[in-house]
Image: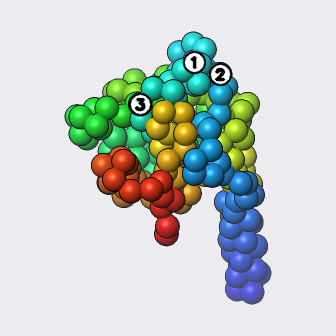
Amino acid sequence: MLRVLVGITLCVALTVVFLLSTTMADPLPLGAAAPALKSVDENGKEVNLDEIFKKGITLVYFYPKADTPGCTKEACALRDKWEDVQKLDVTVIGVSMDKPEAQKAFKEKYKLPFMLLADSEGAVVKAFGVSMMRVGLPTRQSFLIKDGKIVWHDPEVKPDSHLDNVLKAVNGLGKAPAVEEKK
């Protein structure tokens, strides 16, 4: 009986690991033009990303699913330090493959002061080359875009340190060449 339970537990653990593993994609390289595409925000309103990306600095951060623990921690950290983000004149766009209704509920529940894209078809995820978990959710990644070009990328965002890494990167823009966050 014990062997059967151990076997079942091992099988379940391996299944979870498999499902949470990722399929790799090639993210946009530093210096590349930001994708010129349209998406919809949390209200279902069409957003022309090309227009946003051409003006100043934009943080585009990808997260797996709205209103889940890690995604909430990451979004609320941005909200709680919103004044610091605004002082640096950074436009923030959160992206997940949730439907507009889920994004809107997430934004309202946590009073998020920035746009959330409802990329339910995955067009933005694909355009940026964000890897996918086998369960069909995007991995946690961030890109900084300055005047239409990718200037910073963090391919392995951690909710606890995301905002600090972004602020450090933004503060370093113009002082050093574009960088990719190394883990």
Q: Which residue is mark 3?
A: 56
Q: Is residue 23 left or right of residue 163?
A: right
| Residue 147 place in picture, x, y as percent | 48, 33
**Which circle, 3 or 1, is nearer the viewer?**
3
Q: Secondary structure at mark 3?
A: loop
| Residue 40 place in picture, x, y as percent | 61, 20
Q: Which residue is mark 1?
A: 47
Three-letter amino acid code of the residue under disc 1: Val
Relative to 98, say whether 166 is above or below: below
Three-letter amino acid code of the residue under disc 3: Gly
| Residue 131 place in picture, x, y as percent | 68, 52
Q: Earlier in the sequence, mark 1 or mark 2?
A: 2
Query: Residues at badges 1 and 2 in contact (C-beta under 8 Å)?
Result: yes
The image's mark for residue 155 is none
Image quadrant holding the N terminus, namely: bottom right
Residue beneath the point at 60% across and 36% down: 34
Q: Earlier in the sequence, mark 2 or mark 3?
A: 2
Residue beneath the point at 40% across and 40% down: 75
Give the color scheme: rainbow, by chain, secondary structure or one colour. rainbow
Three-letter amino acid code of the residue under disc 2: Lys
* Furthest-bottom residue in this view: 3
Number of numbered discs: 3
Q: Earlier in the sequence, mark 3 or mark 1?
A: 1
Q: Is residue 141 visible?
A: no
* Furthest-top residue in this view: 45
Q: Nearer the viewer, residue 24 or 111?
A: 24
Q: Which residue is mark 2?
A: 38
